[in-house]
Image (tube, rainbow, N blue to C red):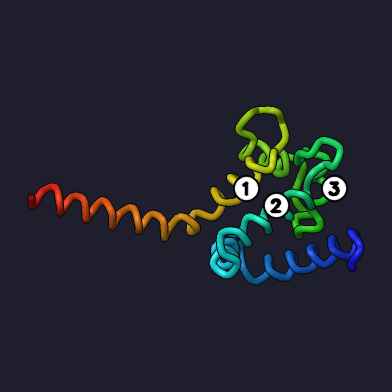
Amino acid sequence: MASRQQRQQQAGAAAAASSAAVDFEDYLPVMAERLGEDGMMRELASGFRLLMDPARGLITFDSLRRNAPLLGLGGMSDDDLRGMLAEGDFDGDGALSEMEFCVLMVRLSPELMDEPRRWLDDAVDQASRFLFTS
């Protein structure tokens, strides 16, 4: 079994390699399609655990700054990291819970919602045709 440090190094190398070829916004929908809903949620939970402060169970500024290089984000300024936290911090506590992290990841990748949006559009279209032709 790989040690935590080895897993973190592997995750950092994979993230650096993927960020060179594909933007996050492009990668997450592909990952979701390949893994399915349950697999995707497991991956997001793993990403959360990699970034979180184990003592608080939240992603804090310090834990994000400490672990950002593992995700290929080592060059980000403190202000950029604070901005990332603020973007997803719905309850205003200055940190990200697992739910806030998952919501943020999905919000950063709007293509994930393309298929559900098409389903909704189709349902509305069918309902409209039914209601207005009856």
Residue drawn at (54%, 48%) of the image? 107
> Badge 2 is on which residue?
45
Using residue 37 as the reference point, say whether residue 114 is left or right of it.
left
Most foreground residue, 113 or 76? 113
Label 1 to label 2, Cα distance in Å? 8 Å
Give how far across and how far down residue 119 sits, in percent.
Answer: 35, 57
> Badge 3 is on which residue?
66
Residue drawn at (89%, 67%) of the image? 2
Numbered badge on residue 102: 1
Label 3 to label 1, Cα distance in Å? 20 Å
State if disc 2 and disc 3 touch (CB < 8 Å): no
Which is in the foreground here, disc 3 or disc 2? Answer: 2
Point out the tag, 3 or 2, that comes first from the N-terminus.
Answer: 2
State if disc 1 and disc 3 touch (CB < 8 Å): no
State if disc 2 and disc 1 touch (CB < 8 Å): yes
Q: Hey, what amino acid is under mark 1?
A: Cys
